[in-house]
Image (tube, helix red, strand yellow):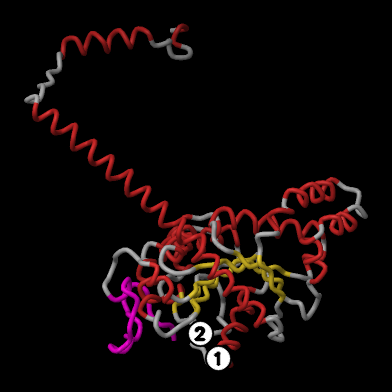
Amino acid sequence: MSDAEVECQPCDPAPETQELPSSAAAGPGPITDADMEKMPSVCIVIGMAGSGKTSLMQRINAYQHTKGEVPYIVNLDPAVGKLPYEANIDIQDTVNYKEVMKEYNLGPNGGILTAANLFATRFDQVVGLCEKRAADIDHVFVDTPGQIEIFTWSASGAIVTESFASTFPTCVLFVVDTPRAQNPQAFMSNMLQAVSILYKTRLPMVVVFNKIDVVRHEQMLEWMDDFEKFHEVVDQDKSFASDLSRSLSLVLDEFYKTLRRAGVSAMSGEGMEELFDAIGRCRKDYLAEYWPDLRRRKEKLKAEDEKRRADALERMRRDLKSGGERVVLDMERLKVNEAVLAADEPPAPGSELD
C-alpha cells in the first residue's frame, strides 16, 4: 500500500512530538538554511528504457532496509506493470493511464505523458507528504518513466524537478546500461542525454553505471578521464557516426569533470556504498552551490516584481494627482482611419479576376 492517494487520502500522520522543519510544520513560507539542512535528500532517477531504473530502485529499497534506514520511494511511472518494491507514493493510485488513453483517444506514449501532466497538477500535495516525513527519513528516491523524454522535456517533469529542488536538497541519478554503453556511439548518446539533463535542471548529478555484474564499467571511466583512449576505440570504425562521436568527446571533456560516477549492480547489490557516498557529496554540492543560487534568483525575481508594482503605483498616483485625463473616442475619425487602412490592404488573391 502506498502512503497516499495524492488527491484525497493523507499519509499516516507523524507523531506530534516530532520536530519538523519550519516549512513543513508552519505551512508554506520561506525555507531557511537551517530548514534545508534538516531535509532529506531527494534523488530523481532518470535513464533510458532498459537501463534498469526500476530494478535499481528495488535494490536501493532492500539496501536501506538492511542498513536499518526507512526507505521512502515515489513512483512516477504510470505504465509500470507491477512494482518490485513498495512505493510510499504511487502515481497509479491516482491516475489510470489506460483510462486516460481511452478518454482522450491517445496512444501509449500520449497516455503516459497526459497521466503525468494530470498528476503534476497536484504535485504540491506530494511535496507536502514528503515534508511531513522529513524527520523520519534520510532519502527520497523518485522513479521516473522509462521514456526518458516524457519526463525530461515535459511540463510535468519540470514541475516535479523544480518542486523538489526548491524544497529539498536534490540530485539526479542518471542510470546507464553498461553492457550497451560498450559501443562508443551508445556511450556518447548516454553522455549527451546526461549533459542535456544537467544543463536543464542545473542540479548535481551522479552517472550510475548499472549492470556491472555483466560488464565492468572501468572502461567507460577511462573514456571519461582520457578522451584519447576513447578515440583509440572510435577510430577503429571509419564512419560518420564515429567521426561525430570523436568530435563530441572533445566538447564533453570538461563536462565529465563535473560529474560524479558510481558503478552498481541492481542484481547483486555491488556498489551501493559507493552510490550513497556519491549522493552524499551531491547533497553538499547542492547546499553549497544550487541552494544559494536559487535564493539569489528568487530574490532577484522578488525585487523585479516589487519594482514593477512600485512603478505601477507611482503611475497611478501621478494620474490621480493630475486629476486624470478623460479619453474620448472620436467615432467618425475612427471610421475614416479604418477606411484608409482597408484601402491600403493588397487585394485578395484572385479578386482582380472578378
Q: Which residues are magenta?
A: 1-25
Contact between labelled residues 2 and 1, with CB atoms less than 8 Å apart: yes
Q: Real-space Cα distance between discs 1 and 2?
A: 7 Å
Q: Residues within 10 Å of mark 1 (few under 14, many from 20)?
A: few
- For residue 67, which quarter of the picture? bottom right
Instruction: Residue at 59%, 82% (x, y): give it.
Output: 60
Give the residue pinned by disc 2.
71
Give the residue pinned by disc 1.
65
| Front-most of residues 243 and 346 | 243
- For residue 175, which quarter of the picture? bottom right
Q: Residues within 10 Å of mark 2 (few under 14, many from 20)?
A: many
Q: Secondary structure at mark 2?
A: loop
| Front-most of residues 40 and 295 | 295
Q: Is residue 254 magenta?
A: no
Instruction: Residue at 34%, 7% (x, y): give it.
Output: 343
Instruction: Residue at 41%, 57% (x, y): give it.
Output: 295
Quarter of the image with the N terminus in it: bottom left
Residue 299 at x, y percent in the picture = 36, 52
Residue 280 seen anywhere in this rendered image of the structure: yes
- The overriding secondary structure of the stretch rendered in magenta is loop
Give the amino acid at mark 1.
Answer: His
